[in-house]
Image (cartoon, rainbow, N blue to C red):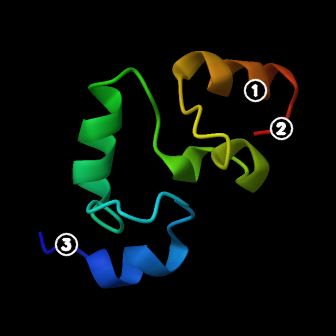
Amino acid sequence: MDCKQAKNRKNCNCTYEPCSRKGACCDCLAYHLGSRELPACFFPADAERSYDRSFEHFARLVAQKRV
């Protein structure tokens, strides 16, 4: 399977600018799961900007019906 990094990058909402994984979803997911986090694309824009990508933060957003 070919990586669609250029296409994925257009929809990537990650605001961390020096990130080398933008658009490389498999690399991004592996990196964040290794830290008990989810990638930016799982979060609404205001929550993503907090850089709190923890499972717990995501669960709070789900409980608030924000995702």
For residue 15, the mark is: none
Instruction: Name the side, left or right, on which 56 lies relative to 63.
Output: left
10 relative position to 67: left or right: left
The x, y position of residue 47, in whole percent, is 72, 42
Residue at horizontal 58 percent and vertical 40 percent from the top = 51
Q: Secondary structure at mark 1?
A: helix
In the image, residue 18 above or below residue 6: above
> Marks 1 and 3, Cα distance to the nearest angstrom?
30 Å
Q: Which residue is mark 2?
A: 66
Amino acid under disc 2 = Arg
Please state, as top left, top right, bottom left or bottom right, where the C terminus lies in the image. Answer: top right
Mark 1–mark 2 Cα distance, whole angstroms, equals: 6 Å
Residue lying farthest to the top in this orientation: 56
Which label is found at residue 3? 3
Closer to the camera, 44 or 49? 49
Q: Amino acid at mark 3?
A: Cys
Choose the circle earlier in sequence order: 3 or 2: 3
What quarter of the picture does the N terminus occupy?
A: bottom left
Name which of mark 1 and mark 3 comes first in the sequence: 3
